């Protein structure tokens, strides 16, 4: 039996925004809630379908997957580790997510066990290091178990006491009309216990912060903005929750000679006017640390590029290597002596249109353009 379209279940258009989705879910949830329809199996099934639809559409990633693949985006995903809209959740979770603000605050697990926060570390490396790759040692702040209280969070010789508000379960129930909502206990913040004498070393947190050294492997060919993820190297979670991740964001220092575009390297090389006219050669360094010879043919024009194959950057996690491009810039002579000036004047007298075909052609066309204007 085919499932009803999620948008049709909520009665909204496919371009509905977040507020419209939430209003539609509230309306439908109130209509089909089991407390308003006792013993009505059809209403109960409808209520679950509506919750499933909202849970999928309120999440931008899940919504994008649904818009593209429909219900097939969540097929074969029944376990709590899958990407199904209800993975690891329940109808009560969705219901409280929408109506929880009526009672103030959101839901929290009774054990308050939560994943630790991720850490971002910015690292700047040279273009040469990006070419070769490197192993870097970095220091980041890390939470470790407090040695004074051994993680118990209380002053030595004392212990946490059961929360009197929630009876140690971490959550309390409240009623709003026909709704019964479970929310985080305001007294213990969902931990089920309170600390009257916190540890002075960790202030009742159970952990203290110290720097730790981590080895980071930077692969050859990384580019500016590359992100490296080290799983489980972030902050510790609450109540022995899993650690977050460490993200290394790389930036490449500007190079004094080379500019990078993807896997290609560009180098701007000034040459003399006589080298451009008569031809010649020069040596240029490469990003690998070697040298290569570049031959300049007679009559080379300003801005001419010469391609050196496989002299660029390696492509990360690939055997491919980019190219290096040498772009020449002809330097106009300055601070001429009288003898140099006389030679250039003599050269100019001996020159013909064949020596400067581009400029000769340009001014010839320009003259024809003005002649046409004058005739009109």
Image (tube, rainbow, N blue to C red):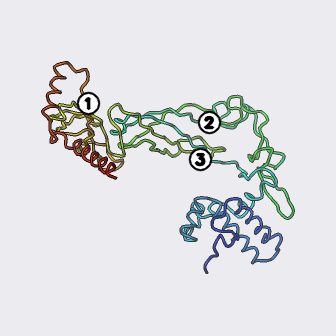
Q: CA distance from mark 3 to mark 1?
A: 62 Å
Numbered circle sitting on residue 331: 1
| Circle 3/circle 1 CB separation < 8 Å | no
Give left or right: position of 135 versus 276.
right
* Lateral position of residue 354 relative to residue 165, left or right: left
Q: Are marks 3 and 2 in contact (CB under 8 Å)?
A: no
Residue 177 placed where, x, y %? 87, 62
Q: Which residue shows up at 79% across the image and 48% down it?
A: 185
**Outermost residue to the right:** 177
Q: CA distance from mark 1 to mark 2?
A: 66 Å
Spot the residue most to the front. Answer: 375
* Viewer-proximal residue among 165 and 282: 282
Picture quarter containing residue 196?
Answer: top right
Residue shown at the point (60%, 43%) measured from the top left: 117
Instruction: Report which quarter residue 353 is drawn in.
Output: top left
Q: Earlier in the sequence, mark 3 or mark 2?
A: 2
In the drawing, does residue 65 fall left or right of residue 128?
A: right
Residue 2 image label: none
**Can you give x and y, in whole percent of width and height, for residue 22 in the image?**
72, 61
Local SS, label 1: strand
Residue nearest the viewer, comparing 260 with 251: 260
Where does label 3 land, which residue?
Answer: 242
- Which mark's residue is nearer the viewer, 3 or 2? 3
Location of residue 210 in the rendering, given as x and y in whole percent from the top left corner: 57, 31
Q: In the picture, residue 261 is in which quadrant? A: top left
Sort mark 3 into few (<14), some (14-19) or many (20+) by Cα contacts within 10 Å. Answer: some
Percent of width and height locating residue 188: 78, 44
Q: Earlier in the sequence, mark 1 or mark 2?
A: 2
Above or below: residue 115 compared with residue 54: above
Per the image, the residue denoted by label 2 is: 145
């Amino acid at each position: 039996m085919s499932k009803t379209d999620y948008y049709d279940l909520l009665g909204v258009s496919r371009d509905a925004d977040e507020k419209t989705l939430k209003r539609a879910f509230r309306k439908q949830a109130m209509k089909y809630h089991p407390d308003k329809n006792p013993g009505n199996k059809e209403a109960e099934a409808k209520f679950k379908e509506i919750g499933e639809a909202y849970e999928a559409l309120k999440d931008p990633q899940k919504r994008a997957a649904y818009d593209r693949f429909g219900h097939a985006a969540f097929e074969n995903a029944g376990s709590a580790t899958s990407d199904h809209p209800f993975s690891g959740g329940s109808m009560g979770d969705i219901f409280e997510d929408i109506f929880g603000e009526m009672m103030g605050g959101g839901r929290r697990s009774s054990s308050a066990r939560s994943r630790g926060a991720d850490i971002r570390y910015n690292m700047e490396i040279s273009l040469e290091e990006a070419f070769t790759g490197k192993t870097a040692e970095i220091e980041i702040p890390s939470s470790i178990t407090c040695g004074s209280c051994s993680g118990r969070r209380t002053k030595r010789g004392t212990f946490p006491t059961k929360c009197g508000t929630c009876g140690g379960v971490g959550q309390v129930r409240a009623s709003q009309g026909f709704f019964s909502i479970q929310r985080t206990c305001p007294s213990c913040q969902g931990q089920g216990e309170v600390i009257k004498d916190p540890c002075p070393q960790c202030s009742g947190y159970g952990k203290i912060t110290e720097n730790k050294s981590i080895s980071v492997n930077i692969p050859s060919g990384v580019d500016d903005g590359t992100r490296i993820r080290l799983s489980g190297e972030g902050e510790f979670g609450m109540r022995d929750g899993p650690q977050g991740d460490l993200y290394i964001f790389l930036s490449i220092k500007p190079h004094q000679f080379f500019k990078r575009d993807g896997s290609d390297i560009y180098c701007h090389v000034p040459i003399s006017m006589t080298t451009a006219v008569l031809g010649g050669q020069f040596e240029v360094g490469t990003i690998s640390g070697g040298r290569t010879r570049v031959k300049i043919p007679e009559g080379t024009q300003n801005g001419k590029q010469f391609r050196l194959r496989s002299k660029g950057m390696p492509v990360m996690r690939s055997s491919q290597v980019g190219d290096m491009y040498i772009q020449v810039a002809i330097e106009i002579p300055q601070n001429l002596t009288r003898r140099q000036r006389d030679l250039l004047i003599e050269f100019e007298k001996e020159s013909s249109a064949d020596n400067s075909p581009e400029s000769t052609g340009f001014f010839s066309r320009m003259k024809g353009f003005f002649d046409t204007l004058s005739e009109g």
